[in-house]
Image (cartoon, coloured by chain):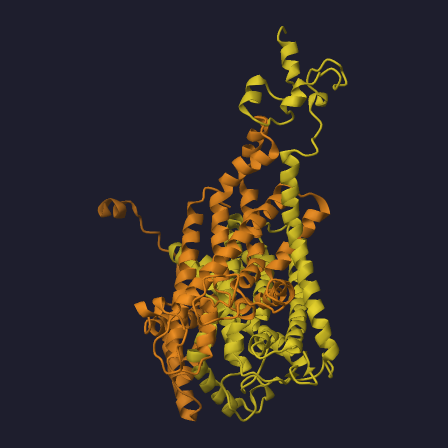
Amino acid sequence: MTTTATSHRTRPPAQPDSLRAKRLPWYAAPAIAVAALALSAVIVYGTGIGGPVLVVVLGAILYLVGLFAAANAVEGRRSARNRTWSALIHSAFVLAVLPLVSVVWTLVSKGADRLDVNFFQTSMNNIGARDANGGAYHAIVGTLEQVGIATLITVPLGVLCAIYIVEYGRGKFAFAIRFFVDVMTGIPSIVSGLFVLAFWVLIVSPWFNDGRPSFSGFAAALALSVLMLPTIVRSTEEMLRLVPAPLREGAYALGVPKWKTILRVVLPTALPGIVTGVMLAIARAAGETAPVLLVAGGGAAINTNPFENSQSSLSLFVYQQAGDASKYAPARAWTAALTLVALVLILTIAAKLLARRNRLSR
Amino acid sequence: MGDTPHRSADAGTGGTRVTQSHEWPAGASARVAEAPVSTRSPGGTGLGGGGALPRSRRFGAERAFRGLTLAAGTAVLVIIAAIAIFLVVKAVPALHANTENFWSYEGWSPNETEPKFGIGALAFGTVLSSALALLMAVPVALGIALYLSHYAPRRLGTALGFLIDLLAAVPSVVFGLWGRDVFSSPVRDFSVWLNQHFGWIPLFGGDGPFGASVMLGALVLAIMVLPIITSLSREVFLQTPTANEEAALALGATRWEMLRTAVLPYGRPGIIAAMMLGLGRALGETIALALTLGITFGISFNLIQNGGNTIAANIANAFGEANETGRGALIASGLVLFAITLIVNITARAIIYRRREFTESAA
């Protein structure tokens, strides 16, 4: 193989150097980098204004300046710009990866401390400041129930709303709904928590609870629904639009009424995409702390009834433990954070894999 | 033509067999198909034409389904209206009880017998920290997005893009915890260094303590919104028509010139949308800031001293010991936050809708 490949390749005819654009030699960039680092080390330690971090930062700046100057002298201004921007873009990447890697590393290393069976089997009931035990069982129960109820509320509502926008809605009203779904995407989570606090906890729930406001998991589920609804509507809407028109027309031509076409032809075709959107919405809702903090009550005991008494959730548990003065609290917080991230990431990855298998692609 | 009368009886249904196999054929129910055709069609022959189609029924499944979807669509409008209404209803009594000016007073003590609270410092802190975060995050995020879409090898770019999408899903409380437990000490060292050497600039002045400052909060916010802005703008950059890029390269543009003349103008509405989405996220962010800011009530441009506060973080912090008026006051502050984010969002959406003809997928 190699011999045939080389035998067909002919050397380009030698060009006179005057016709070629001048280029920096390959060793120029590393050489400039070393020189820049050395110069910055001399400056920093010579004047005594900082440590190794400053050397690297100043070195990077000097490297960019030096690279621009060298390329400008040899290759011309356009090429110099190209090289500098390319270096900037690469350094932006490195700059952003550092903290994100640090987050992941801390999460794994600190979260592993309390990653034991006990953590997943106990609640924080009767756990004092000096007890090293205690776990997140109640919080996991709370998260699952709240997110489950929120999903039950939002999926039918969101899918029907998307069907209206795509299939039936015409004119200004449909446009208004679309616009406000977009606007609703940007509602801060704490505002949805306050809304449910004002509406459900303070006004509606006293009717069932002898006139006293009742904090409950269901209220948290309501707040999460407000956050999930626009996400689900948007993703479903996009998927419905991707369903090929000939499928619908074929059904109409066979005499199938519109509603049946939508339920039997359009929705099944778009189903994988819709499920992906729902899973992403669930993942986002599971990580929300603020609304749960305001309306769920954050109890320390296991409470499987979402309609009565206070519940906690994993993200709220992390926040509570982060604010706890006990010396065992940080370990619990990090382990709960690791559990939460694992839950969210599993959902997200599953959703993305499902999306990849989706036959409707953009 | 011998079978014409038979067919005309089922005109519009596509034939008897279809009628039998479908419980509810388009354009006809069993009752309508039985009705004498000649009375309903203008020509009197019953051969085709709209006259053979049945009138739409008042209580059919079609109507019911359409009504159901319409109700679901209206629910969105109702929810938005309800959010505004209920927040106002609960906020007004507290605002009446307030003994200071809500807009200008710098402090938050609504639980006293003489409630005093003001939104000024909080709104200022919210806008300051979000703006700083965006200022730091946007250039870096665009750099990464360009790297992933146009510099990195294709496989690496796809894999890293997937990773960035995953990071966008990490809950904010995790970033807050990381910012408080891990990131605060390097930021404190950096703040002390800044104060030593650049203390003459008011932004970096003051005499400590440093650490739990606006800078820490804004940095954590920037790291949080970075994946969101990156993944959105990367998607837009990837959708640049290859023809545009190749045309630029064929005219002898360097890679950067190609990016500047073909990719960036094409993606501009998408970039604006991503920025606005990031801004909305930063404005409403609660827990990460509640964990990292040193809660104070004052308007100050000092970035490195302990301090800083935002509307959302204040709600999370003050909610625990709030009484009736206190809750009302917090709800009033939430209403202001709602208004701010609403303005930002509507502006962003208006920009996107106006430019939709250029890029279909920018939203």
The answer, for residue B288, to whether it is visible in the render is yes
**B90 in relation to A147, above or below:** below
Whether residue A29 is visible to the viewer of this picture, yes or no, is no
Horizontal relation, residue A44 to residue B244: left or right: left
Counting from the top left corner in percent of width and height, residue A62 is at: 45, 79
Q: Residue B114 appears in which quarter of the rendering?
A: bottom right
Q: Is residue A112 placed above or below B74 in the rendered structure?
A: below
Q: Nearer the viewer, residue B70 or B96?
A: B96
**Which residue is nearer to you in this view: A123 or A7?**
A123
Q: Is residue B56 above or below residue B209?
A: above
Residue at the outermost top position: B2
Q: Quadrant of the N terminus of chain B?
A: top right
Res. B76 image quadrant: bottom right
A113 relative to A24 in the view: left or right: left
Q: Colour of chain A?
A: orange
Instruction: Please indicate whether residue A133 sits to the left or right of residue A58 in the image.
Output: left
Residue occupying image coordinates x 23% and y 48%: A2
Looking at the image, is B164 positioned above or below residue A248? below
Figure quadrant of the C terminus of chain B: bottom right
The structure residue drawn at horizontal position 67% and vertical position 22%, both measured from the top left corner, is: B32
In the figure, residue B23 lies in which quadrant?
top right
Spot the yellow chain and give its letter.
B
Give the percent coordinates (x, y) of residue A134.
37, 74
Counting every numbered tag in the picture gives 0
Q: Is residue A34 left or right of residue A205?
A: left
Q: Position of residue B283 (x, y in %)?
A: 59, 70
B102, B167: nearer the viewer: B102
Q: Identify which residue, B342 or B317, lies in the foreground.
A: B317
